[in-house]
Image (cartoon, rainbow, N blue to C red):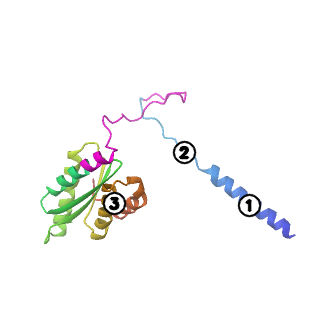
Amino acid sequence: MKNGKRLITILVVLVALLIMASGCSVARKPAPPGTTVPHTRSAPAPTTPAPTKSLPTTPAEVSRLTARLASEAQKVSGVKKATVVLSGNTVIVGLEIKPNIEEKQTTAIKRDVVRRIKETDKRIRTVEVTTNPNIITRVKKVAKGIGQGRPISAFGREVEEILRRIVPQGK
């Protein structure tokens, strides 16, 4: 009797694993109107145009771009210091605001920083800005590590956590 229960338990677990492994499939989206869908897999049609120029990948290029973006952010009135981290086509900005700035002004400053960074480099899709001192410390830690030559991939979890904690500012 004990072997029968064990066999049933094993079978239930195997069935559950099989269902979980095969139950999820990629959702297919319908093609936009006027688009022809190829019938072969050998040459899929691109759905979005390729960017004319990709964002930098070498540490020196990333360093130059983040320095330029931080400089642009610091030109916004009310900004004391800006720290920038580039992750893909997303820019994370840690902003230190000058003393005696009200919350309403801080929101306007953040919007100006987002606008200015996107105008500085059209390849950037998302700009996340924080004035939270704890998150700024984390952004500085990541920026310092990247500046020391570590790849952004070494900070994957930290970047995800930073992005999760930043309240969206309405891009």
Residue in the foreground of this view, choosing between 94 and 22: 94
Mark pair 2, 1: CA separation: 26 Å
Neighbourhood count class around disc 2 (C-alpha, 10 Å): few under 14, some 14–19, many 20 upward: few
Residue 153 lies left or right of residue 3; in this view the side is left
Residue located beneath label 3 in the image: 142
The residues colored magenta run 35-64
Precedes in sequence: disc 2 or disc 1 = 1
Residue located beneath label 1 in the image: 12
In front: label 3 or label 2? 3
Q: Which of the labelled discs sits on residue 65, or is there none?
A: none
Residue in the foreground of this view, choosing between 10 and 65: 65
Q: Which of the labelled discs sits on residue 26, or is there none?
A: 2
Mark pair 3, 2: CA separation: 33 Å
Precedes in sequence: disc 3 or disc 2 = 2
Look at the image and tell me in which quarter the N terminus lies.
Answer: bottom right
Q: What element carries label 3?
A: helix
Q: In this view, does 104 lie above or below 66?
A: below
Residue drawn at (64%, 49%) of the image? 22
Main SS of residues in magenta: loop
Residue 59 inside the magenta-drawn segment: yes
